[in-house]
Image (cartoon, grey):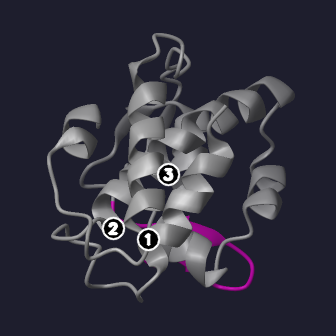
Amino acid sequence: MSEWLAEPRDVRACRDERHVSVAIDAALSWLARPDALPEPRLTALGMADLNPANLMWDGTTCRLLDFEDGGLSDPAYEMADHIEHIAGRLSGVIDGEALIAAVGLSHEERERMQAYRPLFAAFWLARLLPENSGSHRNPAGTTEMQATHLLSLLP
């Protein structure tokens, strides 16, 4: 993640290039810390792509689809991925707090999940930067909104 985020790029296409640059620098500083992320606990099957389009809800049961990148994972990591997925977070499709309650994470698992959230927020900021795949798929100002969100999550 650090290598991708640190790649030289022209952020002049952003509405607020200074704000985006501050968020990138803060994310890189955070990622460089040896204690930034918890030690993974590989105890569950994870999808590795928790786009809301990979969930099927019939009014009673939620089914998970699309496991091509899945494998053994950490439930706290998977929940952070799901809550931070840009498609669900910006659209309001996913109610993160309701999802956490429904999954039944323990207090410790919730703390670990919170520790992973900046990782995924940084990932989405990188995807939204000019010339990356998410840049042209989202409305103007999305990159700045993501920068603000990332900064709010960093300790």
**Which quadrant is home to the C terminus?**
top right
Instruction: Give the number of callouts.
Output: 3
Q: Residues within 10 Å of mark 3 (few under 14, many from 20)?
A: many
Compared across the picture, whether 19 is left or right of 66 comes to: right
**Which quadrant is home to the N terminus?**
top left
Where 70 falls versus 97 (above or below)? above
Q: Which residues lie in the magenta part?
A: 52-66
Query: In terms of secondary structure, where does tag 3 sit?
Result: helix
Where 148 falls versus 103 (above or below)? below
Q: Where is mark 3, residue-wise?
A: 121
Query: In terms of secondary structure, where does tag 2 sit?
Result: helix
Q: Where is mark 1, residue-wise?
A: 16
Q: Where is mark 2, residue-wise?
A: 128
- Residue drawn where x is 76% and y is 35% of the image: 110
Instruction: Give the image location of residue 90, x and y in percent.
Output: 58, 77
For marks 1 and 2, give the CA distance.
13 Å
